[in-house]
Amino acid sequence: MQATFQKLKRKGKLGEKDVDSALREVRLALLEADVNYKVVKKFIASLKERAVGAEVLKSLTPGQQVIKIVHEELVKLMGESQSKIVAGDAHPSVIMLAGLQGSGKTTTAAKLAVHLKTKGHKPMLVAADVYRPAAIEQLKTLGQKEGVPVFSLGKDDPVKIAQEALKSAVREEHDYLILDTAGRLHINEELMTELEKIKSKVNPKEILLVVDAMTGQDAVNVAETFHARLEITGVILTKLDGDTRGGAALSVREVTGRPIKFIGTGEKPDAFEPFHPDRMASRILGMGDVLTLVEKAQTVMDEEKGRELEKKLRSQSFTLEDFLEQLQQVKKMGSLDELVAMVPGFNKMAGKKGLKDLSLDEKQLVHVEAIINSMTRNERLQPEIINSSRRRRIAMGSGTNVQEVNKVLKQFEQMKKIFKQFGGMEKGGAKKKKGFLPF
Amino acid sequence: MLENLKKGLFKTRASLKNRLDMLFGKKEIDEEFYEELEEILLSADVGVETTLNIINSLQKRLKEEKIRDLIMAKEILKNLMVEKLRGGEQTFSFSPSDSPLVILVLGVNGVGKTTTIAKMAYHFNQQGKKVLLAAGDTFRAAAIEQLEEWTSNLPHTGLIKHQSGGDPSAVIFDAVKAAEARGIDVLICDTAGRLHTKKNLVEEMSKIYRVCGKALEGAPDEILLVLDATTGQNSIAQAKYFQEAMPVSGLVLTKLDGTARGGIIFAVKEITGIPVKLIGTGEKLEDLQPFQAEDYVEALLY
């Protein structure tokens, strides 16, 4: 919404200077997020090509416009959301997990099993990490807790374990078989060959690379090698519950071209979520709140309407009809307080003005709509004429009561007041939007 | 150590070595030279700020001293970087006394805590010291079993454990008391490594630290934080969080046998002041070595 109120500073197309200064910040942000150096370089070059000469939307500053383009490109690069496990015709469908030591494979194997189980499948886990002490016990403990059977042959040959597990899964009619392989360095020739062997014997439908979201520059080498050796089908990004920005996601995606399917967000077995490219892009860029605001305001609110609203607010001709429309817009964007909270500076002010009264849930919104629809056009344009008999009529007409009608009218007055103040602040330029964007 | 490190750091990085040869085999120190240096440092996870710092310092020195010679520039760069890692990196000295040496080992999940503990125990065993381990990670499934398995493979190493899910500081308390009673030389305590953003982890760590001092005055003697060389900028946050809970005395940088180089330690040292004391260079029990700043920088750069 701030974007809507933003006074147009420059019109027209993005100049090279605008783009360069914004991209410098973007480059820093990406590097600080651990995106691989080469990936950043390539990305920035392609961005520049796209951004220079691009139209600046009326409601955005050039800097914001560049960020918007960056974000769009990041989302595109991150790929569509494909949080699905592909199943083969053969039963069971084999899923093989691979990755470095400590990336979180065992925990992820258990989470994946729980995920499939809740979808009504009958998965079986295979303890094929025979190297790390107690890895087998760890998987068994987790499997037992979640009620998923774990196949184990102790510290036998992992290739044999995988084959035997497959036979056992066929017998016991499991539809998915999840292989927890040992963590290994991508440059360990012997262990990488072992993975290739397992692959050739059990023919996995999915080979998922498990990557720690905190991985630095090396993510590229790791992903490249695993992909070259195994032809992975997807990626699971773990440990995203920390405060890491997770630039590794972009690096891995760029060098493998494979989708990131799921993310791990905690120790608990259900801390496992589908991957959302847009959320990840915002997180990596690290301009989350502002970006969300720009995006939301851009995609949802019609620009012309926004301008009209702005004019109305300034001239204080904001009516109940506008209020209704506004609420409907807000509904599309998320909750009002959530939205307002994203506007720096506005947050504090609104808090003082009793923002809580403004928060609306979906159900309430239906009532509000009914109430406003039960008013005559005159009442909507001039709410001050609504006296107590009119209030009773409106309450009856909307199937609500007088208290609710009063509440809506009060909310309307409050919103008008807050917006008026906000509009005035912007107009006067009293407070620079500190911390809004670095340029 | 140098050989091992070089082998580790550059197993598949022949290309990088060539690039560096090219960098320092150039005719002059120009824009391109600095750009390439920037790339080398950034791709070693040194981080943007530290990289720019190093480059600026180098530029300044070269200008002040009017140095155009590449070999001299190389020396200056190396010294600059070594200086950044200097201070307190000498590994802990083992001075014989009546009371056991108590070492707390911290780190988030997956960095190689348990393996590092096993390597340390092995190292002390080799010196003829009696070692006791404390299974302080009562949270992660099979963490206790993992230590148990290591212990059974080490000649003079015992284990103090409680039930899974128990109070970790109680385990540490018991272990300190047991170490004293049994005339143990070194007590090494494992701790839980749930992600450091969890406030209660920091609280749990603070409690462990307090309990340790209560059980034995002056304990712990060493608090080692294990960092994974593969991790990027987040290592800084990890060091900060753990430092909030207790005075971390040194870092152990693990997994240097891969292609990651762990350049983040420059920033960690600068921000937290914690020196690197040990490095992990392989999967074998012998693969734990004292950190040598010069060797490390050499291996990182050349």
Image (spheres, rainbow, N blue to C red):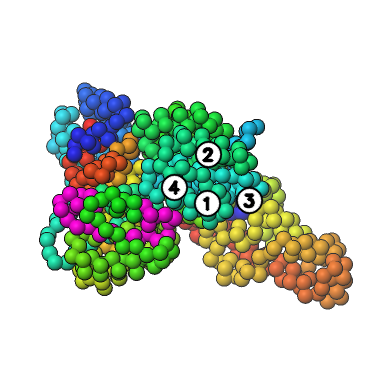
Q: Earlier in the sequence, mark 2 or mark 4?
A: 4
Structural distance between the alpha carbons of marks 2 and 4: 14 Å
Location of residue A176 with respect to A406 vertically, above or below: above
Q: Look at label 4 and name its amino acid.
A: Ile
Structural distance between the alpha carbons of marks 3 and 2: 22 Å
Determine the residue positioned at 14% across, 57% down: B94
Of residues A329 and B259, the one drawn nearer to the viewer in this rendering: B259
Is residue B162 visible to the viewer in this orientation of the structure? yes
Q: Look at label 3 and name its amino acid.
A: Thr
Of residues A140 and B34, the one drawn nearer to the viewer in this rendering: A140
Residue A122 percent location from the top left of the image: 62, 45
The residue labelled by disc 4 is: A136
Q: Earlier in the sequence, mark 3 or mark 1?
A: 3
Determine crowd level at label 1: few under 14, some 14-19, many 20+ residues with C-alpha closer than 10 A. Answer: many
The secondary element bearing badge 2 is classed as helix
Q: Earlier in the sequence, mark 3 or mark 2?
A: 3
Marks 3 & 2 on one chain: yes
Q: Which numbered dot is residue A165?
A: 2
Chain for numbered disc 1:
A
Residue A5 percent location from the top left of the image: 60, 53
Of discs 4 and 3, which sits in the foreground? 4
The secondary element bearing badge 3 is classed as helix
Q: Are marks 2 and 4 in contact (CB under 8 Å)?
A: no
The part of the chain drawn in magenta is B121-146
The residue labelled by disc 1 is: A143
The residue labelled by disc 3 is: A118
Q: Earlier in the sequence, mark 4 or mark 3?
A: 3
Residue A242 percent location from the top left of the image: 45, 53
Residue A90 shown in magenta: no
Of discs 3 and 2, which sits in the foreground? 2
Chain for numbered disc 3:
A
